[in-house]
Amino acid sequence: MSDLDASLEVPGRVSADFAADRGDVIAVIGPNGAGKSSLVKAVAGLVPATGRVTLDGRNLMELPTRERGLGVVFQDQLLFPHLDARDNVAYGPRARGVTRADARRRADQWLSALGVGDLAHRRPGQLSGGQAQRVAIARALVTDPTLLLLDEPMSGLDVGVATSLRIELARHLSEFGGIALLVTHDALDALTVANRVLVLDEGKVAQFGTPHEVSQRPVTDHVARLVGLNVIRAGDELRAFEPTAVTVNLTEPTGSARHRWAGRVAAVTPHGAALRLVVRTADNGPELIADVTPEAATELELTLGRSVWVSVKETSVRAYTNRTQ
Amino acid sequence: MSDSLGRAPARLLVPAGLATLLLVLPLVSLLLTAPWSMLGEQLGTEALRQAMWLSVLTATVATGVCLLLGLPLAWVLARVDFPGRRLLRTLVIVPLVLPPVVAGVALVSAFGRTGIIGEPLRAATGLSLPYTTAGVIVAHVFVSLPFVVISIEGALRSAHQEYDAAAATLGASRWHAFRTVTVPLALPGIAAGMVLAWARSLGEFGATITFAGNYPGTTQTMPTLIYLSINSHPEAAKTLSLVLLLLSLAVLVALRDRWLVTS
């Protein structure tokens, strides 16, 4: 029996089963419309849902939102605009009957822990996106929840701000001790902050595993794209290979490469020191990505629309089975 | 007057000018013919002082009652989903479009001495609303409450429900969230509704005179006194009208951010 056992459905949006123990940080990823937000809102009791979410033996679905003992960080923060940062964070303790002085003292501690202690008297309108998100995280953590829900906390932040917040969030989550559900559309969040990844696709769980499993053996195109991996499927049999393992030629390759496709270059973008090509293969074959050196790209004149052959050696291919279906 | 699309045509400009004259001329006339030299003397007379005091008192009490009753009703309309909500909202708006004198007749049939509620109420407690100051307040509440409900409901709707959700996740009860989040966020709408209600009460004439009569000191408000004295004491009527005009302008200034911001 896990600390958290969930089996719930938001009709028409998402249906998912998963379990977690204290200390787990579950990243929920998937394309837009996969049901990520609906899932966390259902756990919070903010959308109508059926099923069970058992946390330490209590079925949360039978409780009103305020008795579920959750911390929620909303996508657009939803800091109360008429209260300053400190009173926003103190709101939860105050609502639970803590005295004003005590609540404010705790709020100040959490604001400092998140590096925004000096902004305690600012209203949300006077905070930047990153600062507001830190206040929102402090507000969710101050009530000491067993289950923390974070709905895309990094979205809408500048890259630099998101990076530093991600590092700090990872630190707070590792000290958190409860269970965290982190909705994200960013592979980095899933791989660096979480120890479990729940992949949603079209309202269903497509994969649930460690970040390593999910990133090495992705079963959805969405995750394959997120982690930058080529995945070819034949029924439940999948094959994955790195873009660096792909060889690009102008003529059909002879020799040991077992997998080969003809196609056209559909996109060329810089990727680190290399150039990343997207090759649309002929006869509605898979769309493959290949990393080539700039020298090779120049030599082969790999511009948009160029006809090429791509191939990969069998030794570079990981074969695996999709067990969730 | 002219731009690249051509001159503004006279057949639009002339009626527009007439409309402006029609709206402005009576007010200018009132200012021009007001008994400025007798103003202090007029305002000092017992009848005017009584009417002004009574108007301000009843309008203020009515506004308070409107807030106490209207805020909960507005919240129910904005936040609780129940069958018949649209019907209830329609019923709430009816007094807004009802001719005030009809409102007075309706109040008489409900709370009059032989009214459906008025008669048993008098038999049981000896209390009677018609021709009392309380009756004036009831009439004011009846005509002003819709303004308060509509104004606050609009504010509650735009003061996003997500904040209520955020409060609930933080452990707040519905009542705690109402006090600490919903009302503070709707405060501008609440204030606007109260100003509207106060202005509407202050100018209320038809329902008041029909239901509560016109007794100096107890039910004679500024509008009823104006009506009574326009032929016999035109200076008194004009003086009071001037006071009401100034108060109306004050209301307009108070609500300018809501009504006058069009561009």
Image: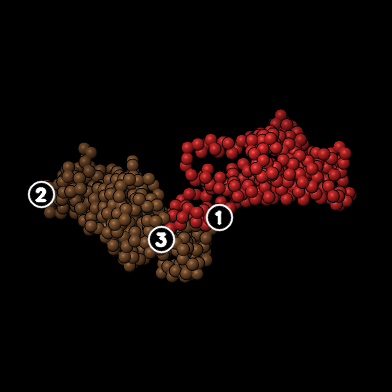
Chain colours: A brown, B red
Total residue callouts: 3
Residue B184's disc number:
1
Element under disc 2: loop
Q: Chain of mark 2?
A: A
Q: Is residue B27 above or below residue A207?
A: above
Q: Is tag 2's residue or tag 3's residue first in the polypeptide sequence?
A: 3
Quarter of the picture holding the C terminus of chain A: top left
Q: Which residue is mark 3?
A: A140
- Outermost residue on the right side: it is B37
Q: Residue at x 27, y 45 (%)?
A: A204
- Tell which subunit mark 1 falls on: B
Instruction: Find disc 2 in the rendering and name its residue.
Output: A255
Query: At numbered mark 3, what does the secondary structure look like: helix, strand or loop?
Result: helix
Which element carries disc 1, helix, strand or loop?
A: helix
Q: Between residue A98 and residue B213, name the one nearer to us.
A: B213
Horizontal side of B196 relative to A154 (left or right) equals right
Q: Residues at badges 2 and 3 in contact (C-beta under 8 Å)?
A: no
Q: In the image, is residue A161 above or below residue A233?
A: below
Q: Which residue type does callout 2 highlight? A: Gly
The residue under label 1 is which amino acid type? Pro
- Disc 3 to disc 1, how far (Cα)? 22 Å
Residue at mark 2 to residue at mark 3: CA–CA distance: 59 Å
